Image (spheres, rainbow, N blue to C red):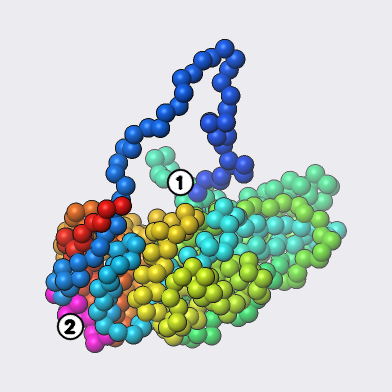
């Protein structure tokens, strides 16, 4: 591993990367139910002709897949443990290479994402609230993974894209709070903060001890700002809830309400009076963004929300149990799965290719709410964690492959969809977890080339729909 800059190395090693527009609560009125104005005589509505033929199921030609992948799967840079699997959207014949399970790294996020969409309302949002008890106000964390210190678009220049997904922020919350307090004649308060929504260890015991001091991941909390990143510099803050409270206190003071003393961590009482709140982007957009840029912190927050939605205690352990049970219910094979977190940072996780194929198949053919797993997959050579990849290998891979990346030291994986040159979508999984550190980049390139080879291959026949 080259060490030109520690930040670049850490970003690559741990698959790190660093917004949504609110939906109308009731949705727009269906034009079909609107009565025409009196006296207007309209012709009967007829069914329109289809504008495109339906997508036909692809039946994998295993011999063709084997021939396409062989030069890349034999690459010595991949190490001695390589797994691969390729199938059509609707199942059928499956090409497989290697046996057993592998360390999945961030392809684990596919499991968490699918379970989140199957468990929570995809349109649901998470509230960060302020409540009042006399002259004490409490900042209450609601588990918004993307809560920001200040409005993300405050310094956006003309022509620049707005942040996506849209993000709630503490400055806006402080401004609303100050307006409400001042209207009640309150200009001086004491501040408490409540991060009690989640339980269990904030730092997963299955993660290497170096992750926190190295700034790989923040302690997971229901209350933080900027995913636990410092306002200046790099890495992660040691106490995200307290840091968020300090930011809120500063913004509240700037808005005209003096905060006496330092913020104190204490749960809000049941009789506290609501003062103000800001809400997160919808769950579906959070899942999409987390998959697109491989956001570890956001995925770990979603894991805890999954546990809460199922009646659990809001811990990572409870979330893992719900994820596995949800996949079982959806028909995804989980017998060989061993999960310790939701993001894939744990090197103790083990997932077989069949499970990842099952998740992708459910996302493609299951309930419409699950499609976000596919729309969140980075596009090779263009978006997210694949924006700077697929520079080598068959050119057909760029734009035709969408896949979730997985990277840890010695581990590289891809799982997603490749659209072949004849238009057939194939689900694929490529995994290796015994890569020599000096071969890391070359191993990643070999997997990229293998996925691109699927896009360049006439590897499937289409069955009549």
Residue at image location 63% in from the left, 69% down from the top: 310
Q: Nearer the viewer, residue 98 or 288?
A: 98
Residue at image location 75% in from the left, 62% down from the top: 138
Q: Is residue 341 magenta?
A: no
Q: Is residue 273 left or right of residue 43?
A: right
**In the rendered image of this protein, does residue 347 appear above or below residue 87?**
below
Q: Position of residue 150 (x, y in %)?
A: 56, 54
Q: For marks 2 and 1, give the CA distance.
A: 44 Å
Residue at image location 39% in from the left, 40% down from the top: 159
Q: Comparing marks 2 and 1, which lies closer to the viewer?
A: 2
* Residue placed under numbered mark 1 in the picture: 162
Q: Is residue 163 left or right of residue 465?
A: right
**In the rendered image of this protein, does residue 15 appear above or below residue 409?**
above
Q: Nearer the viewer, residue 421 or 24?
A: 421
Toward which corner of the image does residue 272 lie, by quadrant? bottom right
Residue at image location 70% in from the left, 57% down from the top: 129
Q: Is residue 140 visible?
A: yes
Q: Position of residue 212 (x, y in %)?
A: 50, 79
Q: Which region is colored magenta?
A: 71-81
Q: Are marks 2 and 1 in contact (CB under 8 Å)?
A: no
* Residue placed under numbered mark 2 in the picture: 76
Q: Position of residue 263 (x, y in %)?
A: 72, 67
Badge 2 or badge 1: first in the primary sequence: 2
């Amino acid at each position: 591993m080259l060490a030109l800059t520690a930040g670049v190395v850490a970003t690559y090693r741990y698959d790190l990367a660093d917004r949504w527009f609110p939906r109308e609560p009731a949705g727009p009125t269906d034009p079909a139910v609107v009565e025409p104005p009196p006296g207007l005589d309209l012709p009967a509505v007829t069914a329109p002709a289809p504008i495109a033929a339906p997508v036909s199921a692809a039946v994998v030609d295993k011999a063709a897949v084997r021939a396409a992948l062989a030069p890349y799967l034999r690459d010595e840079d991949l190490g001695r443990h390589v797994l691969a699997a390729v199938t059509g959207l609707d199942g059928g014949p499956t090409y497989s290479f290697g046996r057993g399970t592998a360390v999945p790294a961030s392809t684990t996020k596919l499991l968490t994402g699918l379970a989140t969409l199957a468990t929570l309302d995809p349109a649901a949002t998470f509230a960060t609230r302020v409540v009042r008890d006399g002259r004490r106000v409490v900042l209450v964390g609601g588990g918004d993974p993307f809560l920001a210190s200040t409005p993300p678009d405050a310094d956006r220049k003309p022509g620049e894209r707005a942040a996506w997904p849209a993000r709630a922020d503490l400055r806006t919350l402080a401004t609303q709070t100050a307006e409400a307090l001042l209207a009640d004649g309150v200009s001086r308060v004491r501040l408490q903060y409540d991060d009690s929504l989640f339980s269990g260890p904030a730092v997963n015991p299955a993660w290497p001890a170096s992750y926190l001091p190295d700034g790989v991941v923040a302690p997971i909390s229901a209350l933080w700002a900027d995913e636990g990143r410092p306002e200046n510099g790099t890495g992660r803050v040691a106490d995200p809830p307290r840091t968020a409270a300090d930011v809120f206190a500063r913004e509240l003071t700037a808005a005209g309400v003096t905060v006496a003393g330092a913020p104190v961590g204490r749960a809000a009482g049941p009789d506290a009076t609501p003062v103000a709140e800001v809400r997160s982007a919808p769950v579906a957009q959070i899942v999409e963004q987390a998959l697109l840029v491989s956001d570890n912190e956001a995925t770990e927050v979603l894991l805890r929300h999954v546990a809460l939605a199922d009646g659990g205690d809001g811990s990572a352990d409870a979330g893992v149990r719900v994820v596995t049970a949800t996949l079982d219910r959806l028909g995804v094979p989980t017998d060989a799965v061993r999960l310790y977190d939701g993001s894939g940072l744990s090197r103790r996780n083990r997932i077989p290719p069949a499970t990842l194929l099952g998740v992708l198949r459910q996302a493609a053919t299951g309930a419409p709410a699950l499609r976000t797993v596919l729309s969140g997959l980075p596009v090779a050579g263009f978006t997210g964690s694949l924006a700077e990849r697929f520079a080598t290998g068959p050119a057909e891979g760029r734009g035709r492959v969408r896949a979730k990346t997985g990277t840890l030291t010695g581990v590289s994986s891809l799982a997603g969809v490749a659209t072949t040159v004849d238009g057939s979508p194939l689900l694929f999984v490529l995994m290796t977890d015994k890569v020599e550190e000096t071969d890391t980049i070359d191993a990643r390139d070999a997997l990229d080339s293998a996925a691109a080879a699927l896009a360049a291959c006439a590897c499937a026949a289409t069955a009549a729909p």
